Image (spheres, rainbow, N blue to C red):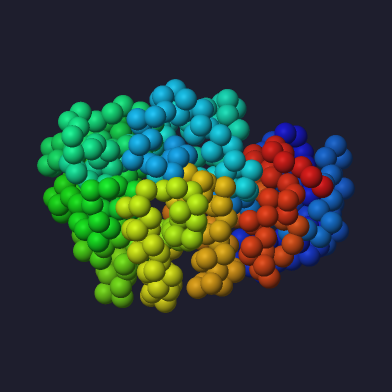
Amino acid sequence: MGLILFTNATLLDCTGSEPVFPAWVAAENGIIKEVGTGPAPDLPGAEKVDCRGKTLMPGLIDGHMHASLFTNDLGDLHRKILPSTSCFMAAKVLEDTLMQGFTTVRDAGGIDAGFREAQKQGLITAPKMQVCGRALSMTGGHADPRLPTEIAPPVAVGMLGVIADGVDEVRKAAREQLRMGADYIKVMAGGGCASAADEPDTVQYSPEELEAIVYEAKAAGKTVLTHNYSTRSMKMCAEAGVHSIEHGNYLDRETALILKEHGCWLVPTMATYEIMATRGEEFGIPSYFLRKMKEVQKHSENALAIAFEEGLKIGSGSDMVGSGQPYKALEIELKARVMGPMKAILCTTRDNAELMGISGRVGTIEAGKCADFILVDGDPLKDVKVFQDREKIVAIVQDGKFIKKNI
């Protein structure tokens, strides 16, 4: 990795400051050493990278992705693909995610700690990641993959759940995921779109079960994130001490105030609804999935607007599945329609790092943090769609190492 000096950059450091040109950044052994403006210093032995005015900014962070959801018929995933094959397919999704400019991700259910460790050891080309393993699901819940005719759950990679009912079972299930190296616990606290047997506007799990899960996570120094659409389930989760609500499409002002009172994050995932609602037939997703995606998509922008106006802590995730996996950066464009370009970009960098508890390492370009950068040929504040054009992301740097260099 050595010493690298980026010069002549338009620096968007994602601290909240406006872009600065000319700027320079020095990184050594994967860590940002110094950041400055004006003419770059002479650093003997440094590899010099002339940014030529392009935008140098932190690597993007996807706060809600599913590396193992690589097919359009999620209900049949485990019936058609061998578990070992699934691992290689998930690794390809992760590599493609990195090539979209996302140097860090939070996988929201499916892959286990082995993928995280494989990335650390250099065995796969992938973003840095946090994982939760399998989501906790009640019998008949959003991550119960069984058909009505099945009794035993399948064993495979994918968005499959640990089926647990009652306080004792959920407590043990949470402890088991923590034992296996989960960075946090994921709970299906309401119905969803990809599951055939439930509707989004429903509640799953009781307050007592949720409180037991949160207790176990906090006891291990970890957090809980929950899958929710309905206001009832969001309120219940916030009151139980959940760290972040994922999706939240039916959010209203009353519920937003409850989330704010409890310091609960909201992580809207708008891109997946946009893609699936407009291209679902083309992708061949099941009719029940498409119907529900179109329904919740109607509410996603309004939910974000309420959250933004009420001052909630907002993260950003794409939640892309199947054929939608290559379009993660669409999330920034959709959020920008409500929040404006700068806030949308900050959600995908600085704020997601805070959400994940890693703001001391990534999310902004500041001395002492990891040298995770992207170099963008364009001004993202004038055109946030630039992130969706891979050719415009001319360089990707992770821990001081070039993953892509086309300058």
Please tell me which residue is depicted at 68% across the width and 70% down the height of the picture: 382
The answer, for residue 235, to whether it is visible in the render is no
Which of 290 and 226 lies nearest the eye of the viewer? 290
Question: Compared with residue 392, is residue 141 higher up or lower down, i.e. above or below?
Answer: above
Q: Quadrant of the N terminus?
A: top right
Q: Is residue 193 above or below residue 114?
A: below
Viewer-nearest residue: 61 or 277? 277
Q: Position of residue 148 (x, y in %)?
A: 18, 39
Q: Residue drawn at (45%, 47%), measured in percent from left and top?
A: 284
Tell me residue 318's x, y (percent). Answer: 48, 53
x and y, in percent, of residue 252 in the image: 30, 73
Residue 57, position as x, y percentages in the image: 67, 55
Left of 405 or right of it: where is 346?
left
- 169 or 65: nearer the viewer: 65
The residue drawn where x is 44% and y is 60% is 277
**Residue closest to the eye, 309 or 337:** 337
Measuring 21% from the left and 58% from the top, which residue is drawn there? 202
Does the image show residue 202? yes
- In the picture, measured across the screen, residue 225 lies left or right of residue 64, that is left
